[in-house]
């Protein structure tokens, strides 16, 4: 049976007064407090909601501070000159403070089957396509995905309002859906990805009743726009917990609607295989950079996850079409990226980076003459070198290990040292041997 309306969920409200919780206004963004206070002073209800409250209760610093209110988007815009309204599926207000954006949402309500299509709309599978239905704070809490996200910090008295037992689930480190899992996953299949991401990020377990249906409904992700799934991949794999998330994604079978070509390779999960070891090492390296506030790029992660598939496809083309190495690589890249973008729409600026990282793997092996200097000057050199180094460590291939060590030494050397390295390389390969030029005999008049 496919749901056609959001059924009310039995909720039991609990108010935790300021003296009984650990949230301090000192830990809340100054700009978020400005928005909360202005809404409150203007006569509206105003709450800090969701992940911000959850993280503060866990003693973590929230990444975002989201607000919920009974003011409509137009009323919010009337209060803040630095406000813009965004979203079609659900109308939101973004209050801009330089680079910081405070997101304000009007309380969401339940779907009436008789509601006009201009307010709400569902697909035949039950997925929400349009969701501009407003309600009160109790209804808004019922519409939230997980119990730990149905927590509201009330700026009026600094209390925390718990509508779904989120405080208890935080204490038990448990992630649990609000309402019927089938309905909630059909409404928005991305909730399955969020379940994995939050469980890993918070080091929570997913409640059995919320986890078990994932295997049955994971296929619904194919109905999500590929562009949205790209944004979800960034959250999954570039948030600092990519390696653990990748493992749980494979364990729950959610990895394969996003990367269907990986399924034959990873179905027999073997962390001793060079291919899987390389992918996990690349994700761990990205996690380390994120936690160290170093720059990361989606191009590197996608290049790593797809690299074993590129090698397989290239080998197939070499045999089937009798192509040269260069042509087989180019054709394999085109085919692989085209196939992958059907599921996860990787923007061109990143597919360009993926190609360059892949192409540089061959160029890193060609170091004679001026080639080493030209490769070193490439904008993607550092990413390509890191990629090479991970390949060498994952495979323990002696040639790759030697090549990675050579480029490591190159980076530590000055120009004179680099010239010496190239001369020694040429000498070892016999390229410095002088060649005698055979002179043509001069023509003489007879």
Image: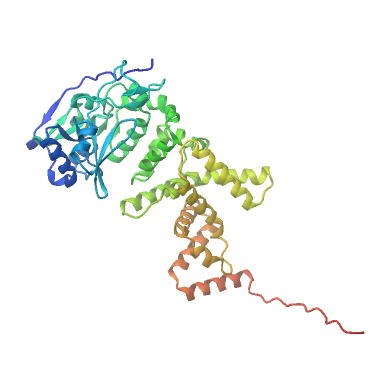
For residue 57, side relative to residue 308 (left or right): left
Quarter of the view holding residue 440? bottom right
Residue drawn at the location 46% of the way across and 64% of the way down: 408
> Residue 314's x, y, as percent?
60, 46
For residue 191, side relative to residue 140 (left or right): right
For residue 419, side relative to residue 432 (left or right): left
Does 413 appear above or below 245? below
Quarter of the view holding residue 230? top left
> Residue 233's x, y, as percent?
40, 40
Does 403 appear above or below 49? below
Q: Is residue 244 visible?
A: no
**Which of the two residues, 337 or 435, is positioned nearer the viewer here?**
337
- The quarter of the picture where the C terminus appears is bottom right
Question: Furthest residue to the bottom?
Answer: 445
For residue 315, side relative to residue 74 (left or right): right
Question: Furthest residue to the right?
Answer: 446
> Residue 21's x, y, as percent?
12, 37
> Residue 211's x, y, as percent?
34, 28
Report the label total.
Answer: 0
Q: Is residue 79 visible?
A: yes
**Which of the two residues, 117 or 334, is positioned nearer the viewer here?**
117
- The quarter of the picture where the N terminus appears is top left
Quarter of the view holding residue 237? top left
Query: What colouring style does the render use?
Result: rainbow
Residue drawn at the location 18% of the way across and 43% of the way down: 32
């Amino acid at each position: 049976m496919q749901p056609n309306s959001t059924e009310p969920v039995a909720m039991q409200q609990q108010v935790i007064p300021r003296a009984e919780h650990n949230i301090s206004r000192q830990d809340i963004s100054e700009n978020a407090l400005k928005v909360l206070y202005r809404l409150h002073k203007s006569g509206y209800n105003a709450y800090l909601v969701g992940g911000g409250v959850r993280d503060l209760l866990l003693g973590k610093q929230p990444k975002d501070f989201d607000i919920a209110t009974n003011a409509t988007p137009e009323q919010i815009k009337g209060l803040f000159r630095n406000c813009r309204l965004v979203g079609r599926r659900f109308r939101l207000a973004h209050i801009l403070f330089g680079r910081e954006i405070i997101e304000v949402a009007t309380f969401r309500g339940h779907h009436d089957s008789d509601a006009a299509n201009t307010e709400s709309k569902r697909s035949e599978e039950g997925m929400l396509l349009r969701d501009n239905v407003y309600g009160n704070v109790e209804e808004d809490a019922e519409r939230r995905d997980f119990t730990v996200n149905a927590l509201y910090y009330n700026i009026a008295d600094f209390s925390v309002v718990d509508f779904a037992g989120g405080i208890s689930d935080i204490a038990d480190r448990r992630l649990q859906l609000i309402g019927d899992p089938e309905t909630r996953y059909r409404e928005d299949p991305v909730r399955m990805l969020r379940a994995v991401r939050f469980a890993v990020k918070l080091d929570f377990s997913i409640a059995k009743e919320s986890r078990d249906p994932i295997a049955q409904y994971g296929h619904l992700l194919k109905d999500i726009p590929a562009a949205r799934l790209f944004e979800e991949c960034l959250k999954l794999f570039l948030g600092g917990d990519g390696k653990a998330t990748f493992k749980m994604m494979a364990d729950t079978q959610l990895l394969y609607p996003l990367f269907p070509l990986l399924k034959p390779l990873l179905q027999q999960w073997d962390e001793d295989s060079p291919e899987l070891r390389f992918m996990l090492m690349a994700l761990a390296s990205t996690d380390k950079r994120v936690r160290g506030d170093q720059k990361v790029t989606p191009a590197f992660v996608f290049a790593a996850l797809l690299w074993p598939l590129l090698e397989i496809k290239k080998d197939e083309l070499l045999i089937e079409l009798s192509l040269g190495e260069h042509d087989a690589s180019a054709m394999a890249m085109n085919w692989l990226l085209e196939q992958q973008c059907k599921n996860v729409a990787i923007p061109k600026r990143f597919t360009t980076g993926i190609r360059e990282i892949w192409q540089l793997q061959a160029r890193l092996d060609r170091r004679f003459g001026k080639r080493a200097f030209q490769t070193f000057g490439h904008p993607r050199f550092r990413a390509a070198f890191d990629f090479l180094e991970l390949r060498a460590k994952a495979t323990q291939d002696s040639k790759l290990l030697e090549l990675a060590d050579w480029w490591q030494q190159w980076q530590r050397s000055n120009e004179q040292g680099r010239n010496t390295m190239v001369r020694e390389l040429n000498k070892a390969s016999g390229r410095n041997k002088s060649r005698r030029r055979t002179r043509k005999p001069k023509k003489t008049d007879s």
